[in-house]
Structure formats: structure tokens, C-alpha cells
Amino acid sequence: MDEFAGKNILVLGGSRGIGAAIVRRFAQGGARPAFTYAGSHEAAQALSGQTGAEAIRADSAARDALIEVVASRGALDILVINAGVLVMGDPLTLDPDDVDRMIDINVRAPYHAAVEAGRRMNDNGRIIVIGSVNGDRMPFAGGAAYALTKSAMQGMVRGLARDFGDRGITVNSIQPGPTDSEMNPADGPMAGVMHSFMAIKRHARAGEVAELAAFIAGPHGAMITGSLQTIDGGMGA
Ligand code: NDP
């Protein structure tokens, strides 16, 4: 498998979970991707050692520094925007600073990173954001702010798909449902409730989401753009 050999790839938020699985998948496909991370230095170094990927410390909440990192990669072929945080709880008591930081990381950063990538991206490039089924459906109390961020991504991919389409660049959102990671462990306290909303009652594996990313990023994805690719075991059905 060498479908990504020689491709210039950047994954934002690649040190753990879904992002790390995507880094691994591109590396298996023959690429030497770069990825960013904020806090998990040891995990980032370990992944880098295992895959040959380049680890770059860059907090997505720092807008101008993030834009600089994206610009420094030159003409990208593939940008995956995975970095995201989850702030859940009673909206009447959530700390507004926590909510705003989530909006910085989950909404502002993806927009500015995608635009900066699009400025210099190679023709037929790929921009993929990791949204969530919660952009379509929020079946619990306490998720309004998180859902807001994931719904915002939907408008962004539709709009940027039209802005960049004349160069063959595709812009899509992958919308996972419950996926086993440190953010949402398959054996966590909410797992049973989440599974009750699903047709296939288990967490996805991060590698399953990575395979979808590889398909969209690969040669067969050329006509998929402006789309929301939901991979949620039927949670939103
Ligand atoms: P994890 O918390 O397991 O991993 C998050 C990753 O994002 C880490 O690599 C983390 O790096 C990075 N990250 C977080 N904040 C920042 C930041 N400020 N700057 C740079 N990198 C950052 O989460 P998941 O793998 O579960 O989630 C990945 C994405 O998938 C998120 O966007 C999430 O919203 C989405 N998602 C997840 C679902 C799930 O059930 N797991 C379901 C639907 C969507 P570091 O630790 O180094 O800071």
C-alpha cells in the first residue's frame, strides 16, 4: 500500500486517539506525515518514533501560531483537522472561558487552518475535518456547546468546498459517533447510554474512522466534496 507515498500531509491533533490512528494510516500508505499536538509530548514522540511522522508542538487555540505552522508546511496535499476538545455540562454552570476555549479549538482553528492550507495547497488536495454526529443530533442534556462547534463545521465544509472546488480541492467532514479514545472510552460511564441510541451497539475503533479518512484522502475520493461522512453505528439514524 503506497497510495500516500510522497504526499505532503499535515494532521492537526495527531498525538492520541482518532488523530493518531489517522497518522498511522497515512504512514502505512507510504507517507511521512507531520502532525501537531498540544500537551501529550510523550505520546507524540512515541508515535513519531513508530511511524517516522514529524511531531510539531502547536496549540490550536493560538490562532496566529497555528496559521504559521500550516503555512510553514508549504503546498500540502492533505490537511486533516482532528484536534478537538469536549466540554459538557449544565450550560447554566459551565465556565464561559472553557466554552470559549472549546470554540477556539473546535471552530476558529479549523476555519483558519483550512483557509491557510487552501491558500497554497496543491491542485486536487484534500481538506478533512473531524466533526461529530453531534453536529446532527445531540441526544443528551449538557452537550449544547459541543454540538454548536460540530454543527459549525458543517457550514464550513460546504462553503469551502465551493471556494476551492475549481482547483479540484475537496473539503469534507467526517462525523464519528462514539469512538474509543481517551475522550470517550468504550468502557466509560456513559457508554451504555450511548449504545442505547445506536443500531450497532458498540464504540467504533479509531482505526475504522482512519480508514474512512484514507478513502476520502485517497485517489477514489476526488468527487466527494462538501459532504458530511457519518460513521456512527447508526446513532443519528
Ligand atoms: P482525544 O482527546 O483522545 O485526542 C484529542 C487529540 O487532539 C489529541 O491528539 C490532542 O493532543 C489533540 N488536541 C486537543 N486539543 C488540542 C489543541 N488545543 N491543540 C492541538 N491539539 C489538540 O480525542 P478523540 O481522538 O476522541 O477525538 C478526536 C476528534 O474527534 C475531536 O475533534 C473530537 O471532537 C472528535 N470526535 C470524537 C468522538 C469520540 O467518541 N471519541 C466522537 C465524535 C467526534 P494533545 O493531547 O497532545 O493535546
Image (tube, rainbow, N blue to C red):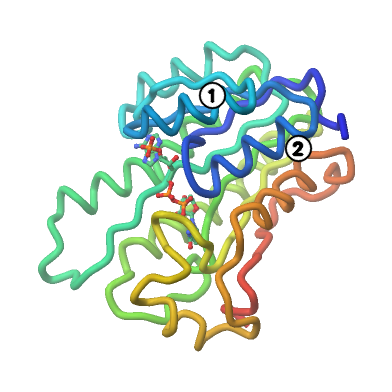
**Amino acid residing under circle 1:** Glu
Q: Secondary structure at mark 2?
A: helix
Instruction: For label 2, count other residues whose C-alpha is less than 10 Å away and answer few (under 14), some (14-19) or many (20+).
Output: some
Can you tell which mark lies on residue 162? Answer: none
Q: Secondary structure at mark 1?
A: helix
Quarter where residue 232 is shown: bottom right
Q: In the image, is 169 to the left or to the right of 12?
A: right
Residue 20: x percent and y percent?
55, 40
Residue located at (36% from left, 34% from top) = 40
Tell me the residue that label 2 is attached to: 165
- Please report whichever mark, 2 or 1, sits nearer to the chain's N-terminal start: 1
Q: In the image, is 58 to the left or to the right of 121?
A: left
Residue located at (37% from left, 27% from top) = 41
Q: Is mark 2 within 8 Å of ligand 1?
A: no
Work out whether 231 lies above or below 86: below
Tell me the residue that label 1 is attached to: 116
The one nearer the camera, 177 or 138, is 177
The one nearer the camera, 134 or 181, is 181
Residue located at (69% from left, 56% from top) = 227
